């Protein structure tokens, strides 16, 4: 196996998938157990409701500021698409239209 990583072999890939499945299960297991017996207060439930938005923002923000295709340079197509998507989302309150606006903005930039 010189020069080959373990995950590149069939058995190694199966082990990798199994370890990822175990890790995913273990991160969800405490919440599943707690969900049966513990009910959070309204304040804690409201706080938990913001977590997906925070995770999404953490995934999107780096791509806006530093996109791999631009090698770290500010790309006006991505920045303007983000701004258009933000404005459309604020006006319509519909994620689909915000995505369409952002994609169309990038398409226009690439057509120029």
Image: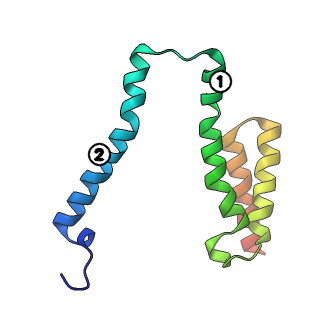
Q: Is residue 16 above or below residue 9?
A: above
Residue at 76 percent of width and 50 percent of height:
85
Please name the residue that numbered disc 2 is placed on. Answer: 22
Q: Position of residue 105 (x, y in %)?
A: 76, 61
Q: Quadrant of residue 64?
A: bottom right
Instruction: Judge by depth and name the residue closer to the eye, 33 or 49.
Output: 33
Element type where label 2 sits in the image: helix
Q: Position of residue 8 (x, y in %)?
A: 26, 72
Instruction: Judge by depth and name the residue closer to the eye, 81 or 72.
Output: 72
Instruction: Judge by depth and name the residue closer to the eye, 105 or 4.
Output: 4
Report the disc number at residue 54.
none
Compared across the picture, whether 61 is left or right of 11 comes to: right
Residue at 65 percent of width and 55 percent of height:
60
Q: Quadrant of residue 36?
A: top left
User: Which one is earlier in the sequence, the residue at label 1 or at label 2?
Assistant: 2
Which color scheme is applied?
rainbow
Q: Is residue 41 above or below residue 87?
A: above
Compared across the picture, whether 85 is left or right of 43 comes to: right
Between the C-alphas of marks 1 and 2, the distance is: 29 Å
Q: Quadrant of residue 27?
A: top left
Compared across the picture, whether 55 is left or right of 17 comes to: right
Q: Position of residue 68 (x, y in %)?
A: 62, 73
**Mark 2 residue crowding within 10 angstroms, few (<14) / some (14–19) / many (20+):** few
Element type where label 1 sits in the image: helix
Residue at 25 percent of width and 80 percent of height:
4
Image quadrant containing the N terminus: bottom left
Residue at 60 percent of width and 45 percent of height:
55
Please name the residue that numbered disc 1 is placed on. Answer: 46
Q: Is residue 40 above or below residue 20?
A: above
Q: Position of residue 74 (x, y in %)?
A: 77, 73
- Circles 1 and 2, Cβ within 8 Å, touching? The answer is no
Image quadrant containing the C terminus: bottom right
């Amino acid at each position: 196996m010189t020069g080959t990583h373990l995950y590149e072999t069939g058995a190694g890939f199966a082990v990798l998938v199994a370890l990822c499945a175990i890790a995913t299960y273990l991160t969800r297991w405490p919440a599943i157990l707690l969900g049966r017996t513990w009910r959070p207060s309204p304040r804690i439930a409201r706080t938990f409701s913001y977590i997906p938005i925070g995770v999404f923002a953490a995934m999107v923000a780096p791509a806006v500021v530093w996109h791999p295709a631009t090698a770290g340079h500010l790309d006006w197509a991505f920045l303007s698409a983000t701004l258009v998507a933000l404005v459309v989302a604020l006006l319509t309150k519909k994620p689909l239209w915000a995505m369409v606006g952002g994609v169309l903005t990038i398409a226009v930039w690439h057509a120029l």
